[in-house]
Image (cartoon, rainbow, N blue to C red):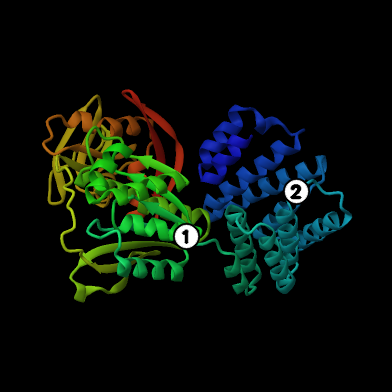
Amino acid sequence: MPVIRSLARSGAIELAWSAFEEAGWHERDDLSEALCLKGRLFKDRAALASPGQRGAWLDQAINAYLAAFDLSPATYPLINAATLALLSGDKARAEALARLTIELLDSGTHEPETPYWLTATRAEAMLLLGDAQRSATLVKQAVALAPMAWEDHASTLAQFSRIAEHLGLAVDWLEDIRPPASLSYRGTMGLSPQDRAASTQIEAVLKRERPGFLYGALAAGADILIAEAGLRQGARLHVLLPASIEAFRALSVMPFGTEWGARFDDLCAAADSVETIATPGPPSVAGVALAQAMVRGLAVVNARELQSRVLTLEVDCLPPSARTEGVSSPAPGLRTIRIACAETVGAATSPLADDQQLLAVIAWPEGGAPIERESGYASWCDLADGIWAAAYADPGAAVAAVRRLERDSGEPLSIGLDYVLAPAVLESPGAVAAGARAIARTARPGQWLASRAMALSLVGEAGDMMIQPVGEVRCAACAIDVYAIASA
């Protein structure tokens, strides 16, 4: 069951339910743990359901939780049933279950749980009873007991926000427990290791914004300065490189001096994760663009999971007179902070390979309407093994093309999307489209499925795009992580 819970927490609701059924847990009405998990999955389905179907899912979730409580009295199923009763419109039942939860907590006969959970559960019960002031005090006590339990804080934040909305309560104090921001970053390599002015600007931004999670590369210069400043402030670092560690270090770090190399090594060792994009050669312009698109998406996904803010920090070299800071919001909910630093005279250069291109590939079944080339389309569209495929310059153009395709077809299509590095001179479109075609074969009619690279890039580009992991498909000798995508 831990794997199923993990899938549910990640947002893979359908995949979690499939695993739940395959294991036979859906038939275990004699096991409290299975009933609690069933209630959780029904609750998640209710959140995704249309207004007309939501009530039925909520009722099933409540029944599952209460059945679990009858088998083994515990606060977890009881408080969840109480909150869901409120969301289903039964305020009196919600209050009765909330009082029962408090009685169980007071009795000391509840299940063994963490101090955070027990305190937050009491706070939730008090909020259901309309005592926002007492609830606020308890929530702050709970957070003090587990100050770094960000996922728990996010769950509390989401649950309490829903309750407050239904009861019309002011809960501004919830901002006090909101997890820190997730920040993706992109820096310039034209800086000296001793550029104190750039370091000061970067440090000031991070102190003001206080991100708890950083996503980016580690090229010599601003990348490393940002990562170091973030770690000093207690942030968690997640690194994504556009090539292997060795190739990236050789081309994007060492040409700027051995000092950068040592700092790069230290940051890799200190990072929570280091991921690389599989490519046969050195970092390329296209590879860097792909990595930057993906880290923006990673930051958005983490911020959504933690009910928190997301922002991007970009540092560029400009003449000394242009050392400024600017803020923009290119997409809803996506805030970008830009710092312009003076370029260091005589800084080393590190030419990136220009032998690759980025292609956003879509694939759909042969029965769909063929696509005519037009402005914004890439150079090819072909049919192979009963699956059409076409390539576009960027994910946004690909999504727009899919929407036109479905409109012109007049029927729901099985769509596969991929974002791939391809040779600059493309001789074999079939190889580039293999991933998108494999994904399209697994999609149901009306379903859009995308590779991880495409899904993250879309989320980072469009603030209203939602993604949900659904498993993986095999393509030649590799496995592709697949996500369902949709507009919010």
Q: Is residue 380 above or below residue 49?
A: above
Label 2 residue SS: loop
Question: Visible in this render: residue 272?
Answer: yes
- Please state if 288 lies on the left or on the right of 378 as rendered: right
> In which quadrant is the C terminus drawn?
bottom left
Q: Position of residue 340 (x, y in %)?
A: 26, 69
Amino acid on which disc 1 is placed = Arg
Q: Give the class, few, some or many, for how many residues have Cα within 10 Å of label 2's Cα (few <14, many ≥20).
A: few
Residue shown at the point (70%, 36%) measured from the top left: 34
- Please state if 432 lies on the left or on the right of 134 as rendered: left
**Can you tell which quarter of the image residue 315 is in?**
bottom left
Q: Position of residue 291 (x, y in %)?
A: 30, 47
Q: Is residue 231 above or below residue 434?
A: below
Q: Is residue 316 above or below residue 286?
A: below
Q: Which mark is residue 232?
A: 1
Query: Which residue carries the number 2 mark?
Result: 113
Q: Position of residue 166 (x, y in %)?
A: 63, 66
Q: Is residue 399 above or below residue 170?
A: above
Residue shown at the point (36%, 61%) measured from the top left: 312
Disc nearer the start of the sequence (2/1): 2
